[in-house]
Image (cartoon, rainbow, N blue to C red):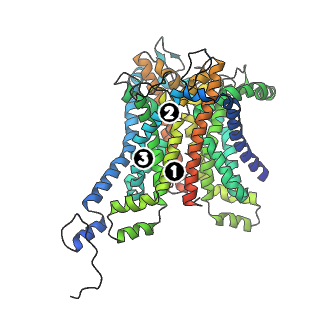
Amino acid sequence: MTTLPIEPAPAPPNTETPSTEPRRASLRGVNASDRIYKGVLTVLALALPLLIVALFVQLFVSALPAIKRFGFSFLWTSTWDPVAEIYGAAPMIFGTLASSLIALLIAVPLALGVAIFLTEFAPRWVRQPVAFLVELLAAIPSVVYGLWGVFVLIPFLRSYAVPPLKAVLGWTPFFQGVFYGNSLLAGGIILAIMIVPYIAAVSREVLLAVPGSQREAALAMGATRWEAVWTAVLPYGRAGLIGAVILGLGRALGETMAVTMVIGNRHDIGLSALQPAYTMAAAIANEFSEATTDTYLSALFEVGLILFVITVLVNAFARLLIWRVARGAAVGSRAL
Amino acid sequence: MTALVALMAFTAVLALVLILGDLIAKGASSLDWNFFVRNPAPAGETGGGVANAIVGTGIIVGLAALIGLPIGIGAGLYLAEYGSGRLGFLVRFVADVLNGTPSIVIGILAWTWMVKPVGRFSALAGSVALAVLMIPMIARTTEEMVRLVPHSLREAALALGYPRWRTSLRVVARTALSGIVTGCLVGIARVAGETAPLLFTALGNLNFTTKVTQPMQTLSLQIYVYATGPFDEWHRLAWAAALVLVALVLVLSMVARWVTRQRYGGVR
């Protein structure tokens, strides 16, 4: 057997068995230190699934007394009376959904407009800076939005926005009653500003993932640029865009501080956007440290459990939709 | 229609400009030496600063980073190196879902685990809550950044006889280092502004303290208390504190972005 004129590769220092076996083993990634490395990383990665399970179990256990006592009626009872120990979350569930709905009504056209502008129409030099500025909106802390809402947005609404709104739409049930400031409307608008960057960032990446051939085909058929967007690009990315919107919804549902500061915190169900309302997150933020009895505390945990389950479902659904378009990628990770 | 979408983009940017403009207009005049070095004055009196909150923010966020970053980076490395199987899919999915979990829910969890058994609010409990918020964020950005490293680099290291773990740490992770640092900075910036998870954990404290087993003030908690309080003096300080907090968060985000731009040029 002739020896080759090159030196054999040095064996890994921690093994003493000769020639090929350890090398092959190390190439397969089965040597001891590799196994330890993989083991450590796996344990760290497992922390995430464990965390979500632990969250659910702990919330459920803490909420159990309230669940046992009130059953499903907790969901549609609208009394919240710590003195009489009767708790029902209907007003908060309603307020959470209503404020998020208002936020989506405002934010979705705005955010999709931003995304379409940035991917399809904007001059190249505008795209990066504008995308950056819109994403900065996501970096502003929630409590600062709340501060701005209390001292800038609400006075603005009171003096300039609500009087004309009432003059035009005052006959509908949605704009009835006196506007004191803290209201469903103020909460919805603040939420809208907060979720625009998320929806815009994810939609932008979804639109960027639409193949250029889709646009070119539409343009070649004689479509204008707008028609190409409307008939070819948007339908192609539809699942991802819906995902982006639902992701924004998930954010809006769980947003706490800004909403707590401007929504008025009143346990009541009313159709008017000018009236104060309450959300689940706001109720926990306001009342958790005041909860003197075990039932009270447990009822708040049940509110937390409902909020958690809803947001997990909403987020999971959104992620699955987005992944269908951009397989497995952390879409929008910059803004999220 | 082009004009319409351009108008929408303009509106979104306008919102940012308005908010930042109001912060500067109402907050900048209150920023003086005392604001940074004094502790809060008793309610109703003028003067005083937020030194306790600035130090508290640093301690709580720093501790959260100590707990959260290693776990997040490790999980991210797992996803990038071994994450092609079923467990990888699950971890990735859960990380994305956890990223959207309301922070207040994490707050009451931290209260149940860290405050209730001890019977005392503590800065440490706040740090744990923030760390939990940080982990899924860091994991996903780390994975993204490590995935950007060209395969040829990894193959070259393996072909030289490097074991996988050394390839992963010394070659791949080191190449992606600036990206990983960016992700960490963004994650830290995000949790630095969080309030909801601290309400029942760090609680807030009007006095200066560096003991992590005691309640501690942060800028975000201070803004919440001052903004919802009855005194004009408090509102003035709330705007100033908000300006400082936003400046801190934005500077961190921008440094992070600048680092990525230097390293990865035109990735997106």
The image quadrant where one finds the C terminus of chain B is: bottom right
Q: CA distance from mark 2 to mark 3?
A: 21 Å
Q: How many marks?
A: 3
Locate residue A157, reporting x and y percent: 74, 28
> Quick one: SS at disc 2?
helix
Q: Is any part of residue A63 visible from this angle?
A: yes
| Subunit bearing disc 2 | B
Q: Amino acid at mark 3?
A: Gly
Q: Which residue is mark 1?
A: B182
Q: Nearer the viewer, residue B10 or B165?
A: B165
Residue drawn at (57%, 45%), measured in percent from left and top? B253
In the image: residue B6, left or right of residue A147: right
Q: Is any part of residue A269 visible from this angle?
A: no
Badge 2: few (under 14), some or many (20 or more) residues near its Cα, within 10 Å?
many
Q: Which residue is mark 3?
A: B72
- Res A230 → quadrant: bottom right
Locate residue B223, reporting x and y percent: 58, 27
> Quick one: SS at disc 1?
helix
Q: Amino acid at mark 1?
A: Thr
> Quick one: SS at disc 3?
helix
| Subunit bearing disc 3 | B
